Amino acid sequence: MSFKWIPNAISLMRIVLVAPILMLILKGGFAWALALFWLAGFSDGVDGYLAKRFEWHTRLGALLDPIADKLLVAGTFITLAYTQHIPVWLAAVVIFRDVVIVVGATAYNFLVRPVQGEPTRISKLNTALQMLFLLFVLSRAGFGWPDQIAITVLGASVLITVVISGVDYVWSWSRRARRGE
């Protein structure tokens, strides 16, 4: 019996969790939003581990995993900016980078060759920092912890890695496209 479907099911669960997380934030239910966001973030690690450890890779999984990540992160950034828990400009920078990556990957897929999902180290670091930042913001909104300085420092780290990873993606994929890879 094949269990290749398990990482895909976990990614689908993350997608389903996005709406309740955002609704809880809008209604001020930060403790529950934090718990569900933590579950979604943890399950991202679990599905990645299972796919790699047992070679349960699928084309669908290669699409679902980043879609789940983008929906969770983008939706949470937008909602926290809307509720004035984070600066709108930071949410805009994060969303802009993701839009550039999605548009670039789509263009590359249709104009050059099918895209093989391969996040860079800086992109993985950026995703981890974004998740941690969002966890901290939700925790502060719900429980008053951690101090604002920790969130500010983490937010600056997110900004730096967003810019570096965005430039890295554009530069590396442009170079590949010129070479026809």
Image: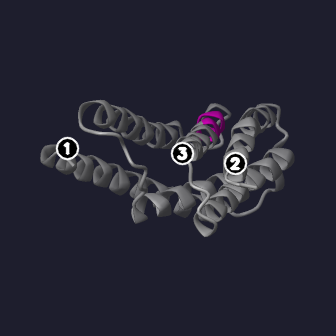
Identify the residue at horizontal 83%, vertical 56% (top origin).
Answer: 143
Residue 133: % across, % down:
61, 56
Residue 149, by quadrant, is bottom right
SS at circle 3: helix
Q: On the rendered structure, is 129 left or right of 41?
A: left
Is 125 located above or below residue 86 in the figure? below
Q: On the rendered structure, is 169 left or right of 128?
A: left
Q: Do the residues labelled 2 and 1 touch (CB within 8 Å)?
A: no
Residue 177, by quadrant, is top left
Whether residue 23 is in magenta: the answer is: no
SS at circle 2: helix
Task: Judge the density around disc 2: few (<14), some (14-19), many (≥20) Cα neighbours within 10 Å.
Answer: some
As shown in the figure, which amino acid type bears the numbered disc 2?
A: Trp
Give the label, 3 or 2, closer to the camera.
2
Distance of mark 3 from mark 2, alpha carbons? 16 Å
Give the mark, 3 or 2, whose residue is nearer the N terminus.
2
Give the mark, 2 or 1, whose residue is nearer the N terminus.
2
Q: Mark 3 points at which residue?
A: 66
Q: Mark 1 points at which residue?
A: 177
Task: Judge the density around disc 1: few (<14), some (14-19), many (≥20) Cα neighbours within 10 Å.
Answer: some
Q: Name the residue under label 2.
A: 5
